[in-house]
Amino acid sequence: MTERRKIIGGNWKMNLNRKDSIALAEKLADETDTQSLDLCIYPALLYLDRVGGVLAEAGSSIKLGAQNFYAKSNGSFTGEISLAMLRDIDCKTVLVGHSERRHKLGESDVLVNQKLRAALDAGFDATLCIGETLEQREADQTNAVNTAQLCYGLAGVNSHQLRQVTIAYEPVWAIGTGESATPEDAASAHAAIRRYVEFAYGKEAAAAIRIQYGGSVKPDNAADFFAQTDIDGALVGGASLEAEDFLRIIRLAKSAEKH
């Protein structure tokens, strides 16, 4: 069986000012050893350059990530930023299709696919976020929704490019609500996601791809998620804004890696 290295992401969303972003990055860089897992942080776009500078000054292997970008390389797109701009500040990875962008900002499956392909073509690692709403869950459509979003999102992505992709399963009803799927429910969804990847790309790709859980992950529930076979890490929202909470989650991921 393929050994999948745990991956933890901290999505700071539209939170923290410049001073607090720098302080959090410094704390993580000082106290986090990433030899046994991959760690990515996604600050607000405005502070990406300065946070990246903190990581570089500390010699940290934490990967700098962007919460958003535009699919075109340049041009008359007021207010947007390009992948070339992100590369210029040493950004390594991006989020694509986060539920808040799908459901609050109206990003379609087609746009999500365009952004994912642009990121992969530009050489970035990318986390493709998928997940169902509460209504879809109650209608027993979780796997159908996830499969459809994977099918659209990965359209045109070849097996080589898939190596740059992490999938984040984030049930919409569990994001920022304090609610979370049970570890068993999350594991079931992750197993179905892996089965789709096997169908589309083969057993080797399915065994290798990493699938994070995202949805109110906290220090007191993270270990239960990490103990599940098909859960390869977490995309953490609110708990990534407090250094001690985030560091505890990271330590729990490391501990799970050893067992």
Image (spheres, rainbow, N blue to C red):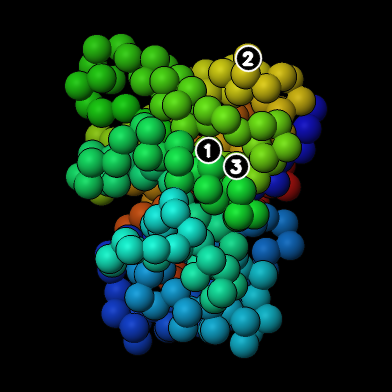
Expressed as whole percent of the image width and height from the top left, the position of residue 236 reads: 42, 53
Which is closer to the viewer, label 1 or label 3? 3
Q: Does residue 177 appear to the left or right of 153 in the view shown?
A: left
Q: Which mark is residue 167?
A: 1
Q: Which mark is residue 199?
A: 2
Distance, label 3 to label 2, CA atoms, is 17 Å
Q: Which mark is residue 165?
A: 3
The quadrant in which residue 78 appears is bottom left
Q: Residue at x 34, y 83 (%)?
A: 18
At numbered mark 2, what does the secondary structure look like: helix, strand or loop? helix
Distance, label 1 to label 3, CA atoms, is 6 Å
What residue type is disc 1 on?
Ile
In the image, residue 31 above or below residue 119 = below
Extreme right residue here?
1
What residue type is disc 3 on?
Val
Q: Quadrant of the N terminus?
A: top right
User: Could you say which is closer to the camera, residue 56 or residue 231?
Assistant: 56
User: Crowding at label 2, few (<14), some or many (≥20) Cα neighbours within 10 Å?
Assistant: few
Expressed as whole percent of the image width and height from the top left, the position of residue 111 reads: 37, 39
Q: Residue at x 20, y 45 (%)?
A: 104
Mark with earlier residue (3, 2): 3
User: Could you say which is closer to the camera, residue 30 or residue 149?
Assistant: 149
> Do the numbered discs 2 and 1 sit on residues whose CB atoms are within 8 Å?
no
In the image, residue 233 above or below residue 87 = above
Visible in this render: residue 102?
yes
Q: Residue at x 53, y 38 (%)?
A: 167
What residue type is disc 2 on?
Phe
At numbered mark 3, what does the secondary structure look like: helix, strand or loop? strand
